[in-house]
Image (cartoon, rainbow, N blue to C red):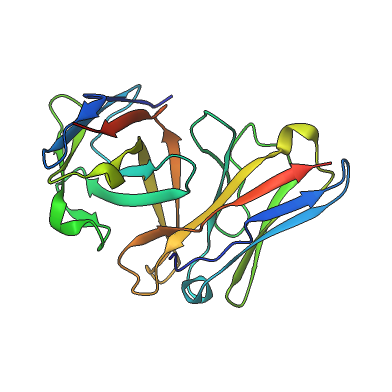
Amino acid sequence: SSELTQDPAVSVALGQTVRITCQGDSLRNYYASWYQQKPGQAPVLVIYGKNNRPSGIPDRFSGSRSGNTASLTITGAQAEDEADYYCNSRDSSGYHLVFGGGTRLTVL
Amino acid sequence: QVQLQESGPGMVKPSETLSLTCSVSGGSINSDYWGWIRQAPGQGLEWIGYIYYSGTTSYNPSLKSRVTISVDTSKNQFSLKMSSVTAADTAVYYCAREVDYYDTRGYYSYNRFDPWGQGTLVTVSS
């Protein structure tokens, strides 16, 4: 089991807003990074830290944190956003890294 | 820009040692951390460990007894060895650069894995 907990699946209507969450005690001390993975491809960084987007990532992706929960929000979801999303941070010991179990996003 | 490429055998026999190498191009390995992550078929991502260019390492506690990560700065490469493999170690293995960020007090705040290699499938089978 992972120290970072994600909902296994989330769906959103095309053009609507969706929030993908990641819960864990370590998130009270550390920010998460978020990765998008499409079938057969390597993960791609979409958000890191408080709310930083790498170049090339659309501004409809944003990140936030409240208490022990980190969130990835997609405002105006597009068909190409359908993918698995993983959060990552340090574990509760602070010495090791851990990934959440992943959330499969379906765009209806 | 920095690019990473995994290489190594696609099949390993049970109880033997899995060996993979990640070649870094477009930049020097003499900075940041360099990590390995794996993904079993149909499963999520699992952090294996990382190495700093100076040789400092950190491993997933669940794999620590079987894993060694090393770096060869002269070749701009880092490597993964995992001993006593079983079918449960069948996975796509990714290498990635890890960058850590610290707050104004100097405490770790967050990280990012970027870029990633394309991944290489390793099957454990006799």
Q: Residue at x 55, y 51 (%)?
A: A86
In the displayed structure, B12 sits above or below B62; it is above
In the displayed structure, A90 sits above or below B48; it is below
Position of the N terminus of chain B, as image quadrant, is top left
**Residue B112, how many percent across, how many down?**
46, 48
**Residue A14, how many percent across, how many down?**
87, 40
Q: Residue at x 52, y 71 (%)?
A: A27
Q: Is residue A78 something that shows in the picture?
A: yes
- Which is more toward the observer, B28 or A84? A84
| Relative to A100, B90 lies left or right | left
Q: Quadrant of residue B92?
A: top left
Q: Is residue A74 something that shows in the picture?
A: no
| Relative to B78, B102 lies left or right | right
- Which is more toward the observer, B2 or A97? A97
Q: Residue at x 23, y 27 (%)?
A: B11
Q: Residue at x 61, y 34 (%)?
A: A55
Q: Quadrant of residue B65?
A: bottom left
- Which is more toward the observer, B73 or B105? B73
| Relative to A9, A79 lies left or right | right
| Relative to B63, A31 lies left or right | right
**Residue B12, how many percent across, how many down?**
19, 31
Q: Quadrant of residue B93?
A: top left
In the displayed structure, B95 sits above or below A23; it is above
